[in-house]
Structure formats: C-alpha cells, structure tokens
Amino acid sequence: MDLSLEIFTPEWVEMLAPTAEAAMAADIKVYVVGDREYNPEDHEYTVEETTYYTGKARIQPIRMEVQTHLTGNPTSIQNIRVQIPIADNFDIRMGMKMRVTNAPLNPVLKNYIYEISKVMDSSNPFERTFQCQIDQEVRDNG
C-alpha cells in the first residue's frame, strides 16, 4: 500500500483540522455578484449576490505588494492567503468576491475588496486554502 495513503487519512484530517481552525481569527463572506437592476421609482440600483460561505477564516498576506503600472492607474496589488475550515467544502472559483465581516485583531481588513485569484489546494489538506488579491487603494463601501 502507498505509505502516503496510510499517513494522510480522514482520521489524520479530523485530528489536525481543529488546530488549523484555532488560528482562524476573522470572519468572512464568499459570494458572487449577479446582475444590477435599476429601480426608476427609487432611483437606486440593487445588486444580486449569491453567498457560498460565511464563517471563520485566517487571512495572511503572502508576499510584498506588487506595483502595477497601468496607464492612468498606478496602484499596489497585494496577494492574500485565506484559509477556512476543511468541513466547509464548496466549489471555490476564480473571480468570486470575498468580504471580511469581522477581524477584531485587525479591523482594517474589513476595508478592502477581495477577489479570489487562485483556487488550487493541497492533495492532503486539513483546511481549505485559496488566494485573493486586493487593490490597496480601493475600499469597500458596502
């Protein structure tokens, strides 16, 4: 039998998952933005959102920001690693949005707009991991 299959078992995941979750000190929402509809009576737009996950997470920058030089919009892009409990298994897709809803130890995390940019995960995870990008000059007003 393959030794890796003997080590990385569902029991191994069950044993390690609580340790990973103990470091998840923020709460997030992962969602997809749908259609915008204009209400002429209220003169307002409504935006449809489909939520895929709400719950705890660990949020960690994974390297220094990257300067981008777009004509008319030089900015700083930061890559962020996000980890959520392994039990919360949904189809994480590139382009999904994420909002930090609570971060008691670093409330400034709630100010950014996160977009999922990488979704590959380990073959033997004990938490779900994905990557987001934020534009450090853009703030979430909603």
Image: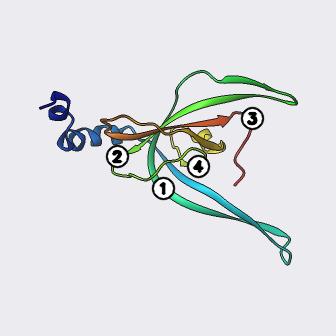
Say if mark 2 contacts mark 3, CB within 8 Å. no
Indicate left or right for 117 with 34 as reference.
Answer: left
For disc 1, the neighbor class at 10 Å (few under 14, some 14 to 19, many from 20) is some
Residue identifier under label 3: 137
Using the image as rendered, state which of residue 94 and residue 54 is in the foreground. 94
Q: Specify which label sits upstream in the sequence, 1 or 2.
A: 1
Residue identifier under label 2: 86
Measuring from the top left, give residue 142's x and y in whole percent. Answer: 69, 55
Say if mark 4 contacts mark 2, CB within 8 Å. no
Q: CA distance from mark 2 to mark 3?
A: 32 Å
Q: CA distance from mark 3 to mark 1?
A: 25 Å
Q: Nearer the viewer, mark 2 or mark 3?
A: 2
Q: Indicate the amino acid at tag 1.
A: Thr
> Residue 78 sits in which quadrant?
top right
Please tell me whether mark 1 sits on a helix, a strand or a loop: strand
> Which numbered marker is on residue 96?
4
Residue identifier under label 1: 54
Which quadrant is home to the N terminus? top left
For disc 3, the neighbor class at 10 Å (few under 14, some 14 to 19, many from 20) is few
Q: CA distance from mark 4 to mark 1?
A: 13 Å
Please tell me whether mark 2 sits on a helix, a strand or a loop: loop
Please tell me whether mark 3 sits on a helix, a strand or a loop: loop
Residue at 28% over, 42% down: 18
